[in-house]
Image: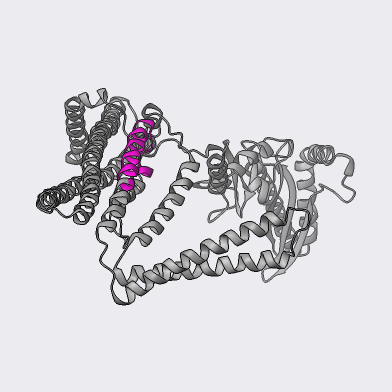
Amino acid sequence: MKGLRRLTIVVPAIVLVASLIGVYLTRGAMANLPFLKGKGTTPGLRGGTDLVDQSPWQTIEALAPLAVSAEETRLAREAQRLADHEVDQAFAQALRQASLDTRTLTGDALALQQKMTALQAVIKEDQAKVDSLTAASKGVNPPGTDDLDIAKAQLQLDNDQLADATQDLATLTGDKRGQIQQELATREAAMKKFDEQGDVVAPSTTQSARRYATLYGRVRAWLDQLTRMDSIAQAQALANADVAKLTAEHATIEKRLSDAGSANAQDTAATGRVARMKQMHTLAQIHSILDDRIQTQKQLAVIYGRWLDQVKRQHQIVLHLILQSIAVIAFLLLGAALTAAAIRRLLDRMRLGQRNLQTMRTITSLAIQVITVLLVLLVVFGAPSQMPTIIGLATAGLTVVFQDFILAFFGWFVLMGKNGIRVGDWVEINGVGGEVVEIGIFRTALLETGNWTDKGHPTGRRVSFTNSFAIRGQYFNFSTSGQWLWDEIRVNIPSGPHSYEVIDAIHERVQKETSSDAKLAESEWRRSSGPYGLSHFTVEPSVDMRPASSGVDVIVRYMTRAGDRFSMRNRLYQAVIDLLRKNEETIALEASGKQS
């Protein structure tokens, strides 16, 4: 037992010292920005089957929601700007790259090209016809509306045929500019919707730091930041990988430019020089775009690095705050253990009985433990947010748990009332009769009488009842203001000629001895009954005779005070004995007279 008590002091002390050392070692973290809380999700940073690589935007689109403070939001917005510019440049490069991949048309492709040329001419004529009919409809003598509708329908039909032919030609030649244009249109629509959403107003790091004043919140933030750092590190690695990939493409374009320049210098044909010049111009544009994309990806990597460094600093701050919370908990446990030890020593010095000493130790130990647990829970989880609801539920629970004590408390007021009980009254509670020796706020104590010994003698047992019996139960009070009660004596009268005379004499003697008490009891009871009265009430002694084998059993019931019952009974028995002795003497005298 002593070893366990020592552990309750040594272990919290060690934890407290270790936590304080950790707090000291991480004290520099508080000079940095306060910590933030991440969402704890690892986004998919790559994926999709688009012709143009849009991963830079997909990456920052997944990471941006993790920025919850104004400082991180600015970094995220800068990364979004760079990623948007990078994807735009990727589309521009893809379109120029697709134009370089055109081939000489032959066969079906050449026929489709010729068909497209013819359709373009037809569409031009259809458009001119629609324009003329539209202008004529606004003149003095407008043509019929059917002609204009037919011309518009024909123009739409020819445009659809041209679109189908263009799609078929792109399929045959492998030209991807149409698909790239579709992807670009989809992206522009998505970006327009994104711009309409506007910036989200985020709290500053100082405001966000106030959210986590509990150990639970700090540990959760620390774990979430591990996931955030992993996601940001992945984004930075992808940006660096894109830099390497774009650098390789840049070298390839430079080689193609060099080869095209050499071929252009050797070729003297005008037609070939013009084509190569166009190709070199396109390659030069792609080269410039690649330079821009490489720089953009490097800037993205720098932004992600700055973001990652900030989260790492915040991660250190959270560790510092966690150590502070652990130190507080260790301090509370150590304080509780030292307080308990001090109280035990104080109780040992007090002159208390062993039973009272053990009771006081248990109560103080339980109180210290409950208070310590509550304080530790406040450090770990903080104060409840829905305090009124929690108070209501706690009150209802305590009412159910302590309903007996509540009823006992209000029952005490009932017992203290006019028709209650007092110390010294003879009562019966829950089938147990005795004299009231104590009436507390919650309990009533009786000295039990008349159980297994003669009626009226105490059994030596003290019986306690909660005062709730005064409200939801019943009790009998046999005491009035004078504590009157009915008592009785039993006498066996032998059969003889003077038996009834003896019984009458006993009756008269009992009446004489109890007359004063009977009159006083009757007046007090009538006064206690109030306006209701006692119409059939009498306190006169009564005699009950029962035949027996040895004569007649006489039971005499009479009124007496509770405190005088034994002395009254002794006096009556003494009088009965005197009457019986006189009866025997009379019988003996009569017998001797007959013999003489």
Q: Main secondary structure of the magenta part?
A: helix
Which of the 4 quarters of the picture holds residue 364? top left
In the visual, does 316 lie left or right of 61? left
Whether residue 569 is situated above or below residue 548 in the rendered picture: above
Q: Position of residue 570 (x, y in %)?
A: 64, 45
Total labels drawn: 0
Pick the front one: 104 or 121: 121
Q: Quadrant of the N terminus?
A: top left
* Residue 466 is a magenta residue: no
Pick the front one: 204 or 323: 204
In the visual, does 565 lie left or right of 381? right
Pick the front one: 276 or 195: 276
In the visual, does 320 lie left or right of 426? left
Image point (84%, 48%), residue name: 538
* Residue 81 is a magenta residue: yes
Q: Position of residue 307 (x, y in %)?
A: 27, 36
Q: Position of residue 511 (x, y in %)?
A: 79, 46
Whether residue 99 is situated above or below residue 526 in the rendered picture: below
Residue 364 in view, yes or no: no
Image point (32%, 72%), residue name: 172
Q: Which stretch appears magenta?
A: 64-88
Q: Residue furthest front?
A: 269
Q: Position of residue 151 (x, y in %)?
A: 63, 66
Whether residue 200 is situated above or below residue 432 in the rendered picture: above
